[in-house]
């Protein structure tokens, strides 16, 4: 009888274990979730699986097909998906530093006015975060984008190759591409976009680049589950920062970027989890700026339902 009771309790405990999936971008963004990947943080009884996406469409497909419950997304991507009718809620922001300006000869650059008459390469196409950010900062500093400064777009790997070949003078890149580009060259990193943003936005944390989103239906059905997953995610970010060598060993299972490059890049990447209740004003200012300077990329601003609590 006693054995039957114990067996019954075990079965009930298994039945009440919640299982969720967080889909996360490939790249350096793997580092903050290594605490979850390595099973070294307390998930409070929730089974958390981490999947990975390589582009926005893949992330959307995983969410729509119910293969993901939570998603780590760029803030602008989440805002656009919300505007398109996907019920996502921004729980918190964890990526605050990633973008840098590099030049083939650091003596050429003093401040943003040094870019007058120059060409700047940045990843992919117009409207991505560093492109809009640079355009905004140029205007703040009295320069006219596309007139005073010309913009060109290529995949980041191609920009790195052309820069190393001496065919690109200036590039605005996220880490670890800025580190990859300048290694072994006479050039260097000359501007921290986040520091420039902080001067204008008076931000406490940096630039709200990416964060943790949850599907609204899950939040409505089980807010306690969302709190547990958020806590585990936050602890994973903290663990990665305080155990970087171990975190990079785990990251190395998923990325081909050499560990020394990632370790160097981490000096210029900032991952710190902040609940949206503490950084909502900063996110709203960022989205307003993106909307004002590139409305084609962010056609509408999200309402209050976009924000957790």
Image (cartoon, grey):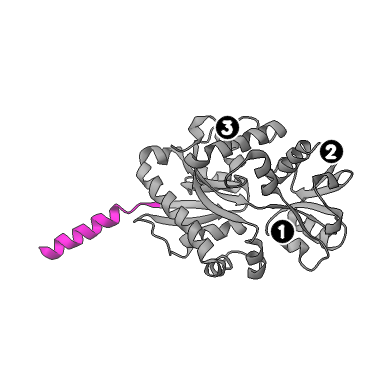
Residue behind mark 1? 177
In this view, the residue in front, 2 or 113, is 113
Q: Residues within 10 Å of mark 1 (few under 14, many from 20)?
A: many
Picture residue at 85% right of the left edge, 42% below the top? 149
Residue occupying image coordinates x 62% and y 29%: 300
Residue farthest to the right, as pictured: 117
| Label located before the other in sequence (2 or 1) | 2
Q: Position of residue 133 (x, y in %)?
A: 71, 42
| Horizontal and vertical percent position of residue 303 | 53, 29
Within 10 Å of disc 3 (Cα), the crowding (few <14, some 14-19, many 20+) is some
**Mark in front: 2 vs 3:** 2
Q: Nearer the viewer, mark 1 or mark 3?
A: 1
Q: Main secondary structure of the magenta part?
A: helix
Marker count (numbered): 3
Describe the element under mark 1 as helix, strand or loop.
helix
Segment tinted magenta in the rendering: 1-19
Residue denoted by label 3:
83
Is residue 4 located in the magenta-colored stretch of the structure?
yes
Alpha carbon distance from label 1 to label 3: 31 Å
Left or right: 196 as drawn, with respect to 278: right
* Residue, disc 2: 146
The secondary element bearing badge 2 is classed as: loop
In the displayed structure image, the side of residue 76 where residue 86 appears, left or right? left
């Amino acid at each position: 009888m006693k054995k039957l009771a114990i067996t019954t309790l075990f079965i009930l405990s298994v039945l009440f274990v919640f299982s969720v999936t967080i889909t996360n971008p490939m790249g350096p963004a793997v580092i903050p979730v290594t605490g979850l990947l390595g099973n070294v943080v307390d998930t409070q009884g929730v089974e958390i699986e981490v999947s990975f996406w390589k582009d926005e469409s893949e992330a959307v497909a995983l969410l729509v097909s119910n293969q993901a419950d939570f998603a780590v997304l760029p803030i602008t991507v989440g805002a656009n998906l919300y505007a398109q009718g996907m019920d996502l809620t921004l729980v918190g922001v964890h990526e605050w530093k990633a973008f840098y300006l590099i030049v083939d000869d650091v003596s050429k650059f003093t401040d943003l006015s040094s870019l007058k008459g120059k060409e700047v390469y940045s990843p992919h196409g117009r409207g991505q975060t560093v492109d809009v950010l640079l355009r905004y900062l140029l205007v703040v500093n009295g320069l006219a984008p596309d007139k005073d400064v010309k913009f060109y777009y290529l995949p980041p790997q191609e920009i790195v190759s052309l820069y190393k070949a001496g065919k690109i003078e200036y590039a605005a890149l996220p880490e670890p591409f800025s580190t990859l580009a300048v290694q072994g060259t006479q050039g260097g990193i000359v501007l921290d976009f986040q520091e420039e943003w902080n001067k204008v936005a008076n931000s406490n944390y940096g630039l709200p680049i990416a964060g943790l989103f949850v599907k609204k239906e899950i939040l409505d059905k089980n807010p306690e589950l969302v709190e547990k997953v958020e806590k585990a995610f936050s602890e994973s970010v903290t663990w990665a920062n305080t155990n970087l060598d171990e975190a990079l060993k785990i990251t190395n299972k998923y990325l081909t970027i050499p560990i020394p490059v990632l370790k160097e890049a981490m000096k210029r990447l900032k991952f710190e989890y902040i609940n949206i209740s503490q950084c909502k004003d900063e996110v709203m200012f960022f989205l307003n700026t993106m909307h004002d300077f590139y409305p084609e990329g962010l056609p509408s601003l999200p309402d209050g339902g976009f924000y957790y609590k």
